[in-house]
Image (cartoon, grey):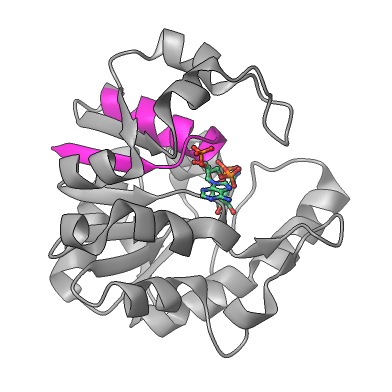
Amino acid sequence: MKIAVLGTGIVGQTYASKLITLGHDVMIGTRNVSEKLNSSAKDSYGNPPFGEWYTKNSSVKLGTFEEAATFGEIVLNVTQGGNSITVLKLANAKNLNGKILIDISNPLDFSKGMPPSLLPELSNTNSLGEEIQKLLPSVKVVKALNTMWCGLMVNPLMINSGDHNTFICGNDSDAKDQVKRLLKSFGWIDKNIIDLGDISAARGTEMYLPLWLRIYGATSNGAFNIKIVN
Ligand SMILES: NC(=O)c1ccc[n+]([C@@H]2O[C@H](COP(=O)([O-])OP(=O)(O)OC[C@H]3O[C@@H](n4cnc5c(N)ncnc54)[C@H](OP(=O)(O)O)[C@@H]3O)[C@@H](O)[C@H]2O)c1
């Protein structure tokens, strides 16, 4: 399948690499292709410049956000949450309409230091997932996988033999079924993918982030997840 990954950070790189190993045709999107390839800047976590990753992963296609959105049959949003709306406007609704958009981003606000908080206008009574669905009413937005470190998203077997939970939500049942199939191809166990309902449930999965960040701060290990026990 043709899959677009909007976002060149560590999460975009993680997804693009994984999707290629699963046999998909992948295009990663950015604002400016030549600037991205030529930049020597490390990301905010100290990861090597994008160009270094791309040299080792050149079977991934690289294009603008708009070119990637046009290319993908399914589109992943893995851009900085506070700028995701800007990115999706650049991608252009006409290239996305009718498609599934899996939103993995979080509306984190780093402006007041670490740990980040949530952007007030995108939390509590709102969420980034809902804002994206409002911006793109003809797109099937499914919020998924945003509640854990990206290495675990695409390799759940890394901990507890894959027995832990992830969440999806969105307004279109068929789209959620298709996203579930993609998650299962990563190793997620069907019963561990919890459907929380419509896209407003993104409020809950995004507002889990402040707790995730505090657990990470307390344990210094990002490879953990939730298991629902009842
Ligand atoms: N790190 C994790 O394990 C993890 C886990 C769960 C969720 N997430 C979420 O995943 C998303 C991606 O995280 P990340 O660390 O890989 O990357 P990031 O640094 O949060 O985002 C990188 C992407 O955002 C775009 N971007 C940044 N500023 C922009 C602006 N002013 N206008 C337009 N685009 C802009 C960049 O575009 P260019 O390509 O043009 O530079 C790039 O593609 C975030 O929402 C994060 O909260 C991360």
Left or right of residue 186: residue 226: right
- Residue at the (55%, 34%) spot, across then down: 10
Q: Residue 57: image x %, image y %?
A: 38, 14
Left or right of residue 81: residue 43: right
Q: Which residue is situated farthest in the bottom direction here?
A: 125
- Residue at the (36%, 61%) spot, across then down: 89
Point out the image quarter for the N terminus: top left
Splitting the image into 4 quarters, where does residue 208 fall?
bottom right
Can I make out residue 106 in this image? Answer: no
- Residue at the (48%, 35%) spot, across then down: 8
Residues in magenta, as a range: 1-20
Q: Which residue is situated farthest in the top direction here?
A: 55
Q: Residue 82: image x %, image y %?
A: 59, 62
Does 4 lie within the magenta span? yes
Does 123 lie within the magenta span? no
- Residue at the (34%, 43%) spot, across then down: 65
Can I make out residue 13 in this image? Answer: yes
Q: Residue 177: image x %, image y %?
A: 19, 63
Choose between 187 and 118: the one closer to the eye.
Answer: 118
Left or right of residue 22: residue 204: right
Splitting the image into 4 quarters, where does residue 42 fall?
top right
Q: Residue 84: image x %, image y %?
A: 48, 59
